[in-house]
Amino acid sequence: MAEAIIDEGEWIKIKSLSASEVASLLVGKPNGNEEMCKFGEIFHERFTYHEYQQDNWITRYGFKKFCRRLAAACREAGLSEKWIRYGIRLAAAFIAAGVEGRTPPTEHVELDEGVMLHAKPDLVVLSYPPRYIELKTQPATDYDRLQCAIFGLALKTEI
């Protein structure tokens, strides 16, 4: 995505690339299973939305509310009950590991004059140092590994 910035009264063109765009250019984006991709989008949206709305993972009621919302969204998308059960197990594992639905701010790194890289993994665990997580619902591919390496470069940490 190209952006224009004014510098001392003059327009300067800046090219800004996302980590996923760079990974796609280098190794190509894999064609994932349509059901897996649909589930991944729903899970990520529900998990982060619950954090934003609720901030209440520790109560049994808060987790049940998340599960009901996840199930409704999966059913609405035409996904089977196995995806709902998988999503509930995945959320329980994340919560047990201290992962909540917080999203990190976008980090920008200047690669060259007029070329920027922006990186934003899916989740962040607010610890010191922060831990970043990129959600994948399918087995990791070269694209996924490269995308995480780019995030690590931009954030100066492992993903």
Image: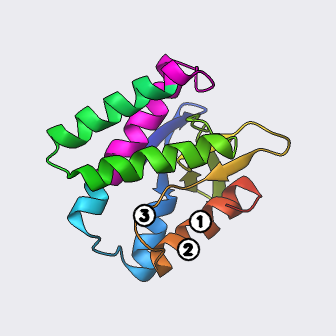
Depth check, front residue: 39 or 145: 39
Within 10 angstroms of label 3, few (less than 14), some, or many (20 or more) residues?
some
> Looking at the image, is 4 positioned above or below residue 118?
above
67 is higher (above) or lower (below) than 138:
above
Label 2 or label 3, whichever comes before in sequence order: 3
* Amino acid of disc 1: Cys
Q: Amino acid at mark 3?
A: Glu
- Where disc 3 sits, the SS reads helix
Q: Residue at x 39, y 53 (%)?
A: 86
Residue at position x 44%, y 26% from top?
A: 64
Q: Is residue 88 left or right of residue 121?
A: left
Q: Are marks 1 and 2 in contact (CB under 8 Å)?
A: yes
Q: Can you tell which of label 2 and label 3 is closer to the viewer?
A: 2
Q: Main secondary structure of the magenta part?
A: helix
Residue underneath mark 2: 145
Quote the CA–CA distance across marks 1 and 2.
5 Å
Q: Which mark is residue 148?
A: 1
Instruction: Give the total of numbered labels.
Output: 3
Q: Magenta span covers which residues?
A: 39-62
Disc number for residue 111 = none
Q: Give yes or no for residue 54 being in the magenta stretch.
A: yes
Q: Mark 3 highlights which residue?
A: 21
Residue 84 shows in this picture: yes
Taking depth in this image into account, of 7 and 87 the one nearest to the observer is 87
Residue 151 higher or lower than 105, as above or below: below
Could you tell me the amino acid type at mark 2?
Answer: Arg
